[in-house]
Image (cartoon, rainbow, N blue to C red):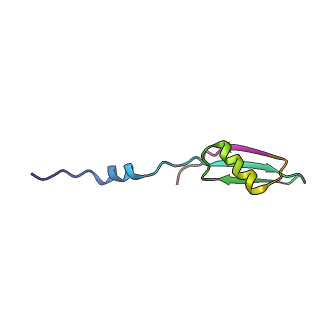
């Protein structure tokens, strides 16, 4: 007898990696200027904060929040 094949759609769904969360960082500098940054590839919110501080250095304040962007 012949073997049955899995549906192509089911095989692709099993191989797709889980999306990592994306964060948004609001940064205020000592001179009063401010910026928004998108943080990708962070493991969690603490890692996202550490990434922003490592990249920018001495800032007055940083606020990190989970981004609720629609998946692409």
Residue in the image at 77% along x and 46% along y: 62
Does 59 sit left or right of 47 as displayed?
A: right
Q: Residue at the location (85% across, 54% down)?
A: 33
Q: Position of residue 11 (x, y in %)?
A: 33, 52
Q: Residue placed farthest to the bottom in the image? A: 55
Q: Is-magenta flag for residue 63?
A: yes
In the rendering, at what x and y percent does residue 16 appear?
43, 52
Figure quadrant of residue 64: top right
**x and y percent of residue 45 in the render?**
66, 43
Q: Nearer the viewer, residue 47 or 68?
A: 47
Furthest residue in direction left, as rendered = 1
Residue placed furthest toward the right = 31
What is the total number of numbered labels drawn onto the structure image? 0
Magenta span main SS: strand
Residue 29 coordinates in the image, percent (x, y): 85, 52
**Residue plotted at (63% across, 46% down):** 67
Q: Of 35 and 54, which appears nearest the observer?
A: 54
Query: Magenta span has 57?
Result: no
Q: Is 3 placed left or right of 61 in the picture?
A: left
Query: From the viewer's perspective, is 71 left or right of 64?
Result: left
Residue 30, above or below 66: below
- What span is colored magenta in the figure? 62-69
């Amino acid at each position: 007898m012949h073997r049955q094949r899995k549906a192509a759609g089911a095989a692709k769904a099993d191989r797709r990696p889980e999306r990592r969360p994306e964060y948004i960082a609001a940064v205020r500098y000592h001179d009063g200027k401010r910026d928004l940054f998108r943080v990708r590839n962070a493991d969690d919110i603490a890692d996202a904060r550490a990434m922003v501080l490592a990249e920018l250095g001495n800032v007055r304040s940083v606020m990190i929040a989970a981004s609720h962007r629609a998946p692409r």
